[in-house]
Amino acid sequence: MAPSHKAITVPAMKIAYGVMGYGRGHASRVTAVLPALMRDHEVTVFAGGEAYDFLATRFPTVRIPTLGYVYGRHDGRQLGYSLLATLRNNIPLLTELATETGSFRYVVEAFRRLQIELVISDSEAWTLRAGQRLGLPRIGFDHIGVLAWCRQQLPPELWLAGQRDALAYRALMGVPERLLVSSFYPAPPKSANTRVIGPVLRESVQYAQPQDHGHLLVYLNRGTRQYQPHIHAALRTLNRPVIIYGAGHTGTEGNVEFRPIDGTAFVRDLSQCHAVMATSGNQLISEALHLGKPILALPEDAFEQQLNAWMVERMDVGARAGLTSLKGDDIQRFLDLHGHYCANLASIPPEPPDTAAEILRGYIRELRGTRSRPPLKPIGRLARLLV
């Protein structure tokens, strides 16, 4: 009689999953792994901003503050990221984080009330820092960690900004005990406690069947500010239908159709589009490449988006153009190379769908019963965050 093999069961842990609230990409990545983790553990999401709105109807979620960009005017248009306004807007929250007061205390008290035992964070500082203060083991899982925890060959024009953002990221997030980085481009890790995997996709994207219905899909993550007359004029020159998400209104003008944000409809239109034009967030680029869709990346004034757009161009699976200077000719040149980009996309190997969840499960087993490194004293952290 053959011996029986029983599945190894691991006692459930109470886990806090912190999610950066700016944009929807972080929340989309979380939805790809959270259902699998919740089969084994009791997970509470901590999120603010758009991530809270996206996740709170589906998972147990606590609202927390979120850092974000503030936009000003660029050449008379409401497009540009304002460094001064962004710093001014975020300093009060950063001060609370660094001095362990206000919102930081709120998160610590929530952890104690919920008896949290381990923290996972997608670019979310409050949960990582609260976990460290309480001595909880921490896992960092995001794309932005590619700046701090991986070796990269940056173009000269992005090198200085890359060093700056990597330092700021490490100062803000600390150094979790385990690190998992998702990247659509190659990024060798710097240390043994870091693993790099390919794109992490929500289930609806994994199982979507790519088709080509001829339309250009456009997504702008701050469309009410970014969808300006020059972009509309450029799209109207095209001899093909255009579907836009994120412009802040609905309706049809000539070949351009404006649709409301809807996750199910967006995945359908993404899987059926001819190509994508979008601000260059990692998650949408990853989803487009998985579905074999060339992308015209329009980076915001932020290093990560600039790097993502540069990588799209370097991999020769799309092109990049200026968000504030886009013309119809830029879009048409991109579309004229559609066949070339598709051939290159076909050579990219797919990431196994359960890779991220399995690695996170392994990390959770390894960290059970361990303690995190002692944190800096509050005044020392304030100096590191604000210098």
Image (cartoon, rainbow, N blue to C red):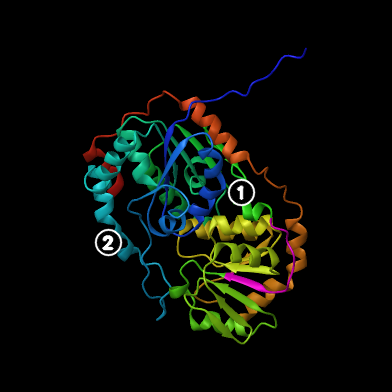
120 above or below 192?
below
Percent of width and height locating residue 87: 30, 59
Under tag 2, what secondary structure? helix
Q: Please indicate whether residue 355 sits to the left or right of residue 174 in the image.
A: right
- The residue where tag 2 is placed is 88
Q: Is residue 27 visible from the viewing direction of this image?
A: yes
Among numbered discs 2 and 1, the one appearing first in the sequence? 2
Q: Is residue 387 visible from the viewing direction of this image?
A: no
Looking at the picture, tell me which residue is in the foreground, 215 or 237.
215
Q: Residue at x 56, y 40 (%)?
A: 36
140 above or below 90?
above
Looking at the picture, tell me which residue is in the foreground, 46 or 334.
46
Percent of width and height locating residue 303: 47, 57
Q: Residue at x 28, y 50 (%)?
A: 94
Percent of width and height locating residue 7: 62, 24
32 above or below 375?
below
- The residue where tag 1 is placed is 199
Q: Which residues are magenta?
A: 208-218
Q: Amino acid at mark 1?
A: Pro
Under tag 1, what secondary structure? loop
Give the residue furthest to the front: 1
184 above or below 81?
above
Q: Is 253 covered by the magenta stretch?
A: no
